[in-house]
Amino acid sequence: MTTLLSPLAHPERLSAAVHSVVQRAIHEQRLTGAVVAIACRGDIIYHLASGMADREAGAAMKTDTIFRLASVSKPIVSTAAMVLIARQQLTLDTDIRRWLPDFLPVLPDGREAIMTVRQLMSHTAGLGYRFFESDETSPYAQAGVSDGMDDSPISLEENLQRIARVPLLYPPGSSWGYSLATDVLGALVARVHGSTLAQAVEDLVTGPLDMTDTAFVATDASRVATAYVSDVPRPHRLNESERVPVVPGTSGIIFSPERIFNHNAWPSAGGGMAGTARDILRLLEALRQGDKRLLPIDLVAEMARDQTDGAELPEMPGVGFGLGFSVLRDPILAGSPESTGTWRWGGAYGHAWFVDPAQELSVVALTNTLYEGMSGQFVNALRDAVYAV
């Protein structure tokens, strides 16, 4: 475990180090803008905005800028599910057909599959993502499945029906694969709560934590950051329905920047929300500290436990997955200064966050540049700057 000299003792050093990393990424035109928020031992010790929220309009980034969250929504909805578990309205290891009787995907040989809430939250359910497929002749594309970031006019219920038409990639619980499982979880949360998913998330998570800027629809367009795509010589403005591959050889994500303003868009638990860096930090700190407004500490511990039985995540050595986010198993294998047990994930619109419980540290970096802010050199540079202080 890395020994961290408390940034509380030297806040000016941490501020300078983090600011240098952000400014370098902006100066080198890898990022257009960013908001970084850091908490240590329960205190917010850094919360600054840099660069441009809208380069063409000359609008500077602000600390209360709202971002399209993409997969940063996953820990939010996963927490909502855990609140229902805490209330004994939901259980981790029960067949989800108890609550979603019409969601009946099968194995490749046609056999029925038993899928649990735990498997949905840990991405071991056998589902996939359309954007990982090779082309438009692949199964999810042929079924018309939406990944939750396009402008698809279908409903959440219709998307679940389309997902269920595609055979599972593997028997639930036998492997790990990043997937639309959180969107299925969102439908389950709404069903158990007896409301829309938006209302369920507000009642269970964002309302109790006063996350006032986090929702499935952004109502103040003037505060929403413009999205950009990593490019040469500088990021270009993300176009409506632009397709951007996540990894080579895949069809890529179809993005609809306008989706976040559409009240009729189906609520994607896995990639459809908007919010601020301060709101996300508030959630992560509530989980880290065991805030009783959310969950008892034993359920937070379960979220933070590797659920993969030692399976390796693709391109992420030494990393497992808990219930809603990754969990660091082996810092040496991962080549990371973070402590064993650190939680981490990000979002395709250009975001990264991590929580190091051993160091009582939470870091949120929301940017408006995909994919540099999610998986570019900025992510590790920021991490290393924090631990080097």
Image: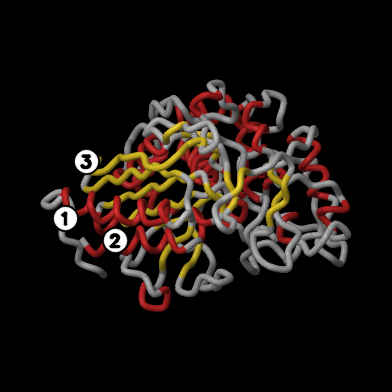
- Looking at the rendering, in which quadrant would you find the N terminus? bottom left
Nearer the observer, disc 3 or disc 2?
A: 2
Q: Residue 23 versus residue 69: which sits nearer the camera?
A: 23
Q: Is disc 1 surrounded by few (<14), some (14 to 19) or many (20+) residues within 10 Å?
A: some
| Residue 385 numbered tag | 2
Q: Tell me whether circle 3 and circle 1 mark residues in contact (CB < 8 Å).
A: no
Nearer the observer, disc 2 or disc 1?
A: 2
Residue 178: image x %, image y %? Answer: 62, 59
**Location of mark 1 (residue):** 6
**Location of mark 3 (residue):** 43
Q: Residue 305 versus residue 377: which sits nearer the camera?
A: 377
Please, what secondary structure does the residue beneath circle 2 have? helix
Separation (CA) of disc 3 from disc 1: 11 Å
Q: In the figure, residue 389 lies in which quadrant? A: bottom left
Please, what secondary structure does the residue beneath circle 1 have? loop
Q: Is disc 2 surrounded by few (<14), some (14 to 19) or many (20+) residues within 10 Å?
A: some
Residue 253: image x %, image y %? Answer: 70, 51
Q: Is residue 110 left or right of residue 309?
A: right
**Amino acid found under the numbered disc labelled 3:** Asp
Q: Is residue 96 left or right of residue 153?
A: left
Q: Residue 222 versus residue 294: which sits nearer the camera?
A: 222
